Every structure is written in structure tokens, then in C-alpha cells.
Amino acid sequence: MNRFGIKFHFTTFGESHGKAIGCVVDGVPAGLEINIDFIQNELDRRRPGQNEYATARKESDSVEILSGTFEGKSTGTPIAMIIFNTNQKSKDYSAVAELFRPGHADFTYWEKYGIRDYRGGGRSSARETAARVAAGAVAKLMLNELNISIESGIAQIDGISAKSHNFSNVRSSEIYALDEDVEQMQKDAILKAKENHDSVGGMALVRINNLPVGLGEGLYYKLDALLAEAMMGINAVKAIEIGDGIEASMHKGSANNDQMSPNGFKTNHAGGILGGMSNGQPVEIKVYFKPTPSIFITQDTVDINNNEKEMNLKGRHDPCVAIRGSVVAESMAALVIADMILLNMGSNIEGVKNYYA
């Protein structure tokens, strides 16, 4: 499946070393101002090759809108966007054409389809996530009209955890760090792994602010369930937590329950979601990324004929995918919320009557 969402949905296309990647976003209400500069800025946040903490691949990630807008506004028809690949080095992968890279999707794609694009993983490459960020930018433009904001940052790198979560620090940080007091230690861990031809994992925190109460569709399309699906669909994500997450399982009910007063909830252990629906509190999501599987250390593997081989990988890869991955997680959250907003409009008869009044 290459499509995500129900009312506000998108489909992506393209491969890492193909001519281009892109997306088609459908369900966008007509009359929404489509700010191309905003979309490009979102892509620039995820763009590779910006500093020593990311892959050296240099892509401008310049986006072009092909359809769905007129005089700067959405027309209610599908919005197609394309991003041309300009810095592929496919020859870097010729030596692994018949080998399965450990930690990658090579083996499963080969077993499922009997064919695979070995140039950087093809469709399974994280390069595809640029298209998700473009789609997420359109979702954010809609959410901005409702004063709903989404922010993200790095809360943990290689086990070095933030002690505070300062989202204002993120935009000035090369690694989108939430805590400037541990930022240098996190940077040092990344560079040490890079110097040793290895990689490190990390955790991104995504926060959704100013949601109305009631987003989420009952039992089988819950807000937290869909956010989990969206995050787990991002390359290298191995776990997520909502609110206190795993820690909640270690508490008594008396400590975990968010008690209430006439002024609202006193705490937010639930992470802004109760019964699968938003409760008006900020929604907080912890997204855990595994270490980048592309490393430059000799590893054992097999080839397509199941012969034992040694893997010596070449190419340009992120020493920590969590950094740029945090922007993708933020974008996927925006796409989920945009979909939920539109689905919620008909949740009761008064809402329907008010619309058609």
C-alpha cells in the first residue's frame, strides 16, 4: 500500500535512485492558501547534506506543484508534487547487487517480489520520506487555519537523554536537540560512531498542541492507534509511546490517572488521548529510531543464492537517522490530525446541521 488516510489522504511514488519522488495529496478543502515557500521550508528541515551529523548526499529537495492549485489556493482536486533526484551515486551499490545488507529490507523485498532495486534500497529507502514531508506540509497549512501546531525535537541519542524539553532550542540546533545542556554530548556520540564507521539510534518527541476534544473514531480508528501506525510506518522506527507510555505500566492507577478539576486535567500522563480520542491536552508521542543499518564495518551476510559472503558497504549515510526522522514524524502527525479533523466534522447531527445551515 502506498496510500495513507481516509478523508485527507496521500499517495507517494518514486525510488531513491530513480528520476524523482513525489506525492499526490487528495481531500484538501478548496480555498486553502498553498504556500510553496512553507512547503519548501519543511523539506529543507529534512534535507540531507546540511552538516556533519547527516549523510553527505547533496539534494536540494526542490519541490514543484503539478496540479490542484489555482492562483495560490487549493481547488479541491488532487495536489500533485514532485521532487527530482539530482545527486544519485548508483555505482556505490553495484558491489551489493546480489548481497543482502544486514538490517535493511533487501532480504524481505527479494523474498516477496523476486526482484529488488539495490540502488540505495529503491522504494524502501528513507529518501521516500521527503514526499511525506511535502504532503505533511500541506496538512500543516490546513491545521494552521485552526491554530493547531505540531513540533518535534530530539530527546535522546545513543542513550543520552534530555533532562528538559525546550522546543525553542530545536530550530537553532544542528541535531534538533531539545536540551542544550546535553546537546554537545549527543553530538559527540554521533561523531564518535561516525569516526568508527558505525551508527547510533535515538528518540524524537512529537507534541501536538491545541487540539479540539474528540478527534478519533471510536474503537477501530482511534487517534493513538493511527498515530502509532503512522510512526511505525517511518523507516527505522521500532517503537513508539503515547504520553507516559511504558512508564505507565509501572505505576499504580492512583498515580497514573489524570485527575480533573473545573479548570481541566491536573496532569497529562495519558498524553492527550483517552478512549482513543483527544481530550484537549497536548498529545505527546515518543518515536524510537534504530541505529542506521548502513555502516562501514565488515559484516556477515548471504547473497541471493544463499552463499556466505562478507559485506563491505560504500555510500553516504546518516550516522543517526533519528535527527532527520524527527521531521518526518512531525509531518506524519500532521497528516493524521488533518484526516481526523475532516472525519470529525460529521460526528454528530448538530455539526452536520451547522454546516448546511
Image: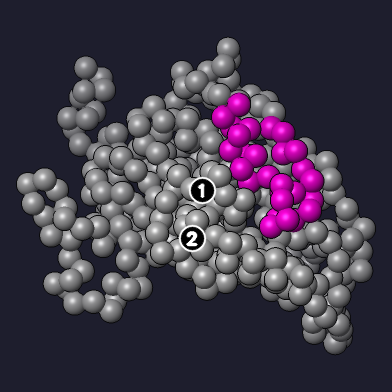
Question: Which residue occupies 69% across, 57% down?
Answer: 53
In the rendered image, the residue lying farthest to the top is 71
Of the 4 image quadrants, the one containing the C terminus is top left
Residue 168 placement: quadrant: top left
Whether residue 345 is visible, yes or no, is yes
Residue picked out by circle 1? 170
Question: Which residue occupies 31% across, 49% down?
Answer: 282
The color scheme shown is one colour
Q: Secondary structure at mark 2?
A: helix
Residue segment shown in magenta: 37-63
Q: Is residue 342 above or below residue 296?
A: above
Question: Which residue occupies 60% across, 34% down?
Answer: 41
Residue 118 placement: quadrant: bottom right
Question: Which residue occupies 48% across, 36% down?
Answer: 139
| Residue 82 colored in magenta in the image | no
Whether residue 231 is visible, yes or no, is no
Q: How many residues crowd mark 2 within 10 Å: few (<14), some (14–19), many (20+)?
A: few
| Residue 57 colored in magenta in the image | yes
Q: Nearer the viewer, residue 109 or 105?
A: 105
